[in-house]
Image (spheres, rainbow, N blue to C red):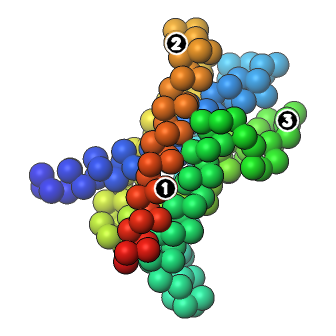
Amino acid sequence: MADFISSVLISFVTIFVIMDPFPSLIPFLEYTKKCSDNDRRTCATNAVVIAGIIAVVFMFVGPTLLSYLNLSISNLKIAGGIVLVLLGIETVLGISFGNHNKKENINDVAILIATPLLTGPGLVSTLIILSESNGFLITLVALVFALLVSWFVLVGANTVKKIAGDQFIHVLAKIIGLLLLALGVAYIRTGLLG
């Protein structure tokens, strides 16, 4: 049981660092500034549910897809590592590699927060890798916890902003971006050595 809890905890930290809901706070608050608290909560819930569905589908279909395309886990580690490095650079340096146009519709906001902000290529790659190394149950439990914490972060966005302030959120996002860079480098290294 202790091994199970330890594996879930390690997987949770990995998933949560990659999912990283904190950089999503500012766009989430900006895109929902004209919404009621109830609509903001609905948007956060929809974003997390969509992110969860995408993550679980890829977690279960991913290995079959890799096999069909004749790709190895080492290939995926290298590819996922590159994506994580790019996400880390984007977070740390503020360089945008994707199209982050402002959304007006609450459903568009939920989709934008769900993907690519919560569940992007980096998380999908990581979930497949974790599933292969730790098993589906451990990875799924860790994912559910990471999604729940992300939901609490988004639902409490206004409170977090008032308590922590924009500067703290910005600094925290940069620190998590550095962790993404380090994790990406580690994935590339183990993929090359794999």
Q: Give the number of the mark in front: 2 or 1.
A: 1
How far is disc 2 from disc 1 in space, using C-alphas?
28 Å
Judging from the image, what secondary structure is the residue with disc 3 in? Answer: loop
> How many marks can you see?
3
Q: How many C-alpha atoms fall within 10 Å of the one at disc 3: few (<14), some, or many (≥20)?
A: few
**Residue 78, x across and y down, in percent:** 51, 69
In the rendered image, the quadrant that contains the C terminus is bottom left
For the residue labelled by badge 2, is the local secondary structure a helix, a strand or a loop? Answer: helix
Nearest the viewer among 80 and 113 is 80
Residue in the image at 50% along x and 26% along y: 172
- Pointers 2 and 3 in contact (C-beta within 8 Å): no
Left/right placement of residue 7 relative to residue 65 reads left
Q: Which residue is mark 3?
A: 102
Which residue is under mark 1? 184
Label 2: few (<14), some or many (≥20) within 10 Å?
few
Crowding at label 1, few (<14), some or many (≥20) Cα neighbours within 10 Å? many
Mark drawn on residue 99: none
Which of 122 and 139 lies nearest the eye of the viewer? 122
Residue drawn at x 59%, y 23% is: 170
Q: Who's the residue at 39% across and 49% down the image?
A: 14
Q: Residue at x 75, y 43 (%)?
A: 96
Task: Name which residue type carries label 2.
Answer: Ala
Q: Can residue 20 be seen here?
A: yes
- Seen in the picture, residue 69 relative to 14 is either above or below; the reply is below
What residue type is disc 1 on? Gly
Real-space Cα separation, disc 2 to disc 3, in angstroms: 24 Å
Residue annotated with mark 2: 164
Specify the farthest residue to the top. Answer: 162
Whether residue 156 is visible here, answered yes or no, is no
